[in-house]
């Protein structure tokens, strides 16, 4: 009864749901069932708690120091309804960061759970590991890694501002897709402060093994950081032309493509 | 100050934007902004107060001051005073009756459109039930053209959106071919790139253009990147059909998108100069969505639906080919569940069409919203009956790059079959020539040796 599509070979080129076949104008039963299972799994991924202790111990093993902070959000339900609270640190966290501040760093990396703690669990440490050699090459001073619970992207501006960082990179769980519950986004901002908005940030999205690989994400971030420090800008005025070798300064890919 | 006196309570509303906000059907974004009605009675009272306000008031009392906001200045400066005489005697309540009356023809609505400000459109929509929004939108006829004709009654177009998380050309092509063989893509073949990199954007654009040229497809391509990127692509002689930009309804929100009216004008003129359209020269493609102003902390205390309608005033200034609300994309803090998304989709479609735009919809949701594909079926069907010019098509409804669910090629087939809707005429003819559809416009199953399937670009 099902009319199959005669281009199943195209499936090798994409993870998208193509060549599904049809019954009349409708999806075959097995595709309806597959879709509803994926949706159920993505829904579940949104609500998984952020295990920052696990990430902290991995970072400590790499010789990096960490600080754990919380936004003003109390629980997941509030996180979903009140993004404004997810952009502000709670009082305790502000005090903690103020106390920890000693001298300005070139870069503060923040790991925030965002909408998928599964993404930060799997991708964040790998990206940082791949980034460290570039930072060394750039002679960039990295501050403590900040682990942020119930975080929105703009929470990084407040963190960077308290720590007087020259730049920040927020590694945050992206909204889970049906086919990718563990996708990480990276937002880089030059001179973070509370007047920054989306146009001031450079974004590297879909960081995961099946998407933008850790090594390539780290290279892109390093390229943007170098250009950002040279030009003293970030955001829409700083174009990502990292794949144009002629435009590179110090930063060249360390990995083999 | 506005007042509604009920038997045992008098409701007072400080100013026009307060009446507007409190008259809005409940949605999480207005609650988040602190502008929503405190209870259902206050909402009903606000609607009563709003119904009595003359349309003229919206010309005298700007929700966001003229001096502070270039979108307000655009609305005021471009207002057609002559055409306003058609409706200048009406209150908001009368305006609803006027739109719905049999004596008001589609031509009269089209004629009045340049005299309708977004605030008037938003206000009247707040007094409308879903069925009003549907039947009124159906009455607004808007047609736009580039290489085909979009928005004719009895027709439905689709944007083919085969995104790739890594901007892989073969992945994009595979999804595109699947879509074309399902009869999708007459609104635009439009890719949301993962990258901001100009060389990558250029390559995607060239690949889409090559397929369109090689098979002489009467459609247009678009790479949905920031408008400043597209200007650079045009400068590098990349074959750009349409210029895309996300826009919002206040100057401050647009600033947060890195744009202003001058930048949009510059891109509009650049695209016009290429003269790549064949049957028309509508060259802009905009996306919008309720909540974007609040998200940028740029709403000035105005409710999110009114802010959205103001974005349409920005859009119509540049005579776009396509405008669509990405209605459920923004998330549950603005539209919490299926009910709110469905309502917003119908409001956006109606307001956009009333303001003279070919307003389509990305019938969509994210995985952190309280909704599912059943709600999308409902909204899709309602918008089909409201005669929506175009919808978004993603393979299997699952966008693997933007991580949200939209509507699929199958969903478009469903709507065409249910409501007997045809493709854009030029594109429909092409589908038949390519043996993708039969003479009745029904989909056929293409053979594995179909010429389109031999067009996959080589791997890198």
Image: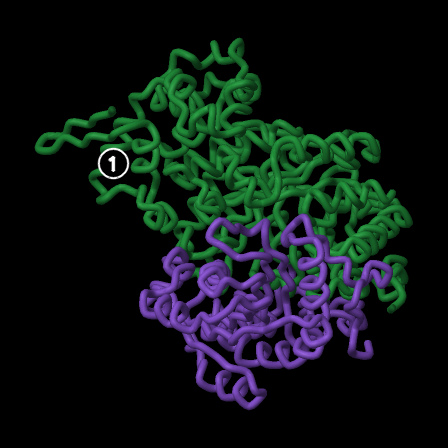
Chain colours: A purple, B green
Residue A245 x, y percent position in the rendering: 85, 63
Residue reaching furthest to the front: A103
State which quadrant residue A10 falls in. bottom right
In this figure, which residue is indicated by the disc labeled 1? B44
Residue A113 x, y percent position in the rendering: 48, 71
The residue under the point 63% across, 40% down is: B286
- Disc 1 packing (10 Å; few <14; some 14–19; many ≥20): some
Q: Can I make out residue B139 in this image?
A: no
- Relative vertical location of residue A111 with respect to residue B137 in this rendering, above or below: below
Q: Is residue A72 left or right of residue B272?
A: left
- Relative vertical location of residue B228 with respect to residue A235 in this rendering, above or below: above
- Relative vertical location of residue A180 with respect to residue A156 in this rendering, above or below: below
State which quadrant residue B409 falls in. bottom right
The residue under the point 55% across, 90% down is: A61
- Relative vertical location of residue A197 with respect to residue B62 in this rendering, above or below: below
Tell me which chain the residue with mark 1 is part of. B
The residue under the point 29% across, 21% down is: B52
Figure label count? 1
Residue closer to the observer: A123 or B349: A123
Quarter of the image for the N terminus of chain A: give it: bottom right
């Amino acid at each position: 009864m099902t009319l199959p599509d005669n281009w199943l070979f195209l499936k090798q080129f994409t993870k998208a749901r193509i060549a599904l076949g049809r019954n009349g104008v409708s999806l075959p039963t097995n595709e309806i069932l597959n879709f509803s299972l994926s949706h159920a799994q993505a829904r579940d991924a949104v609500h998984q708690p952020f295990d920052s202790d696990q990430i902290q111990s991995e970072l400590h093993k790499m010789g990096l120091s960490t600080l754990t902070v919380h936004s003003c959000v109390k629980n997941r339900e509030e996180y979903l309804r009140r993004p404004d609270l997810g952009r502000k640190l709670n009082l305790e966290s502000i005090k903690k960061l103020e106390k920890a501040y000693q001298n300005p760093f070139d870069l503060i990396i923040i790991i925030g759970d965002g909408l998928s703690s599964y993404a930060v669990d799997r991708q964040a440490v790998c990206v940082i590991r791949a980034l460290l050699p570039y930072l060394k090459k750039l002679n960039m001073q990295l501050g403590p890694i900040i682990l942020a619970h119930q975080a929105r992207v703009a929470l990084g501006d407040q963190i960077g501002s308290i720590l007087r960082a020259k730049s920040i990179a927020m590694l945050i769980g992206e909204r889970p897709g049906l086919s990718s519950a563990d996708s990480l986004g990276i937002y880089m901002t030059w001179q973070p402060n509370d007047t920054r908005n989306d146009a001031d940030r450079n974004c590297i999205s879909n960081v995961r093994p099946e998407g933008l690989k850790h090594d390539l994400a780290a290279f892109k971030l390093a390229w943007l950081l170098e250009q950002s420090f040279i030009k003293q800008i970030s955001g829409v005025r700083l174009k990502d032309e990292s794949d144009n070798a002629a435009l590179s300064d110090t930063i060249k890919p360390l990995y083999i493509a | 100050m506005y007042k509604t006196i009920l038997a045992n309570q008098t409701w007072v509303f400080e100013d026009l934007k307060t009446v507007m906000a409190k008259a809005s059907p409940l949605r999480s974004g207005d609650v988040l902004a602190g502008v929503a009605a405190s209870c259902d009675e206050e909402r009903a009272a606000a609607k009563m107060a709003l119904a009595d306000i003359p349309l003229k008031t919206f010309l005298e009392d700007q929700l966001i001051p003229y001096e502070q906001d270039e979108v307000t200045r655009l609305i005021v400066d471009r207002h057609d005073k002559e055409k306003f005489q058609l409706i200048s005697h009406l209150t908001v309540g009368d305006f609803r009756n006027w739109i719905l009356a049999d004596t008001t023809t589609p031509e009269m609505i089209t004629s009045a459109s340049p005299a309708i400000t977004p605030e008037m459109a938003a206000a009247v929509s707040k007094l409308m039930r879903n069925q009003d929004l549907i039947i009124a939108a159906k009455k607004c006829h808007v047609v736009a053209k580039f290489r085909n004709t979009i928005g004719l009654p009895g027709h439905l177009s689709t944007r083919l959106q085969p995104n790739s998380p890594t901007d892989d050309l073969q992945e994009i092509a595979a999804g595109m071919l699947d879509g074309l063989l399902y009869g999708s893509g007459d609104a635009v073949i439009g890719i949301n790139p993962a990258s901001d990199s100009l060389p990558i954007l250029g390559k995607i654009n060239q690949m889409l253009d090559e397929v369109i040229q090689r098979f002489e497809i009467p459609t247009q391509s678009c790479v949905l990147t920031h408008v400043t990127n597209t200007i650079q692509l045009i400068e590098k002689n990349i074959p750009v059909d349409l210029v895309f930009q996300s826009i919002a309804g206040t100057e401050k929100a647009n600033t947060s998108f890195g744009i202003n009216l001058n930048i949009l004008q510059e891109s509009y003129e650049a695209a016009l100069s290429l003269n790549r359209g064949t049957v028309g020269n509508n060259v802009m493609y905009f996306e919008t969505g309720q909540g974007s102003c609040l998200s940028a902390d740029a709403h000035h205390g105005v409710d999110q639906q009114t802010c959205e309608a103001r974005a349409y005033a920005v859009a119509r200034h540049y005579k776009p080919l396509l405008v669509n609300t990405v209605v459920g994309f923004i998330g549950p803090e603005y539209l919490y569940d299926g009910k709110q998304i469905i309502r917003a989709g119908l409001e956006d479609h109606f307001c956009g069409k009333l303001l003279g735009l070919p307003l389509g919809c990305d019938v969509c949701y994210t995985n952190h919203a309280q909704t599912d594909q059943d709600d999308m079926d409902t909204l899709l069907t309602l918008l089909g009956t409201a005669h929506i010019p175009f919808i978004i098509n993603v393979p299997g409804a699952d966008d693997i790059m933007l991580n949200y669910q939209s509507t699929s090629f199958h969903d478009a087939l469903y709507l065409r079959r249910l409501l007997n809707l045809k493709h854009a005429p030029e594109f429909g003819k092409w589908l038949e020539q390519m043996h993708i559809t039969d003479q009745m416009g029904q989909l056929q199953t293409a053979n594995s040796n179909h010429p389109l399937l031999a067009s996959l670009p080589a791997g890198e």
